[in-house]
Image (tube, rainbow, N blue to C red):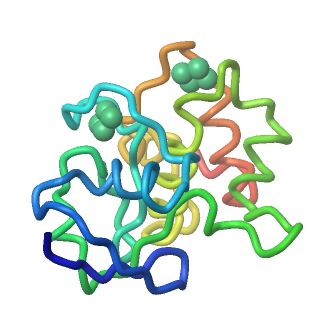
Amino acid sequence: MPIYRLSVNGAEHRVDTDADRPLLDVLREDLHLTGTKYGCGEGQCRACSVLIDGKALPSCRMPVSAATGKQITTIEGLAKGAALHRVQQAFLDEGAMQCGYCVPGMIVSTVALLDRTAKPTDEQIIAGLNGNLCRCAGYSRIVAAVRRAAGGNHA
Ligand code: FES
Ligand code: FES
C-alpha cells in the first residue's frame, strides 16, 4: 500500500494505507487519537470535525490521500501541556456537555469560528456551528460557551 505523510498536531506521521481510507479512521485507529468521534460517517453530524489548515472539516468523508501536505489539528492538539485551550476551558466552565460525544467537534468548529470572527454575535455563533449536531440538545450552553470563549456577549 502507498505511504502517506500526515502532519497532525505538529508531528509528522507516515501511514501505510489505502488512498481512500477516511482520515477519521487513520486518526483513531492508526494514530490512536480517539478524541475525534465517529457519528454518522456521512458528513452530516460533524462529530468527526478536525482542523485542516485552520478550517473545521468532517474527517469521516475525507480520504487520507487528500489530507497529505496539510496541517491537521485534532482536539488533542489544542491544549498546551496541562493548560486547556480557552475554548475547551469555556466549555468546561459553562458545563456545555451532557454525554460529551459532540463536544470535540463543537470545540474544533468554535476554534475555527473565533479565528475567523473574534467577537461573534449570537447569529454568527449559530451560523458558525450550523451542521454540528448535539443529540443531547445542549445548544444553549454550547452557545454560552462560545460567547465565553470570545470574551463575552456580543449579541
Ligand atoms: S461522523 Fe463525520 S459528519 Fe458525522
Ligand atoms: S452533549 Fe451529547 S451529543 Fe452533544
Residue 83 at x, y = what percent? 86, 68
In this picture, residue 122 sits left or right of residue 129: right
Which one is in front, 12 or 9? 12
Q: Residue at x 53, y 64 (%)?
A: 114
Residue 139 visible within the image? no
Q: Is residue 5 visible?
A: yes
Which residue is nearer to you in this view: 38 or 47?
Answer: 38
> If the picture is divided into quarters, which one holds ligand 2?
top right
- Residue 136 image position (x, y, % from top left): 56, 13
Q: Please identify the quarter of the rendering in which residue 41 is found.
A: top left
Q: Quadrant of residue 155?
A: top right
| Above or below: residue 111 compared with residue 39 | below
Horizontally, is 92 left or right of 65 in the view?
right
Task: From the viewer's side, name the closer residue of 3 and 8.
Answer: 3
Q: Is residue 19 left or right of residue 111?
A: left
Q: Residue at x 73, y 67 (%)?
A: 79
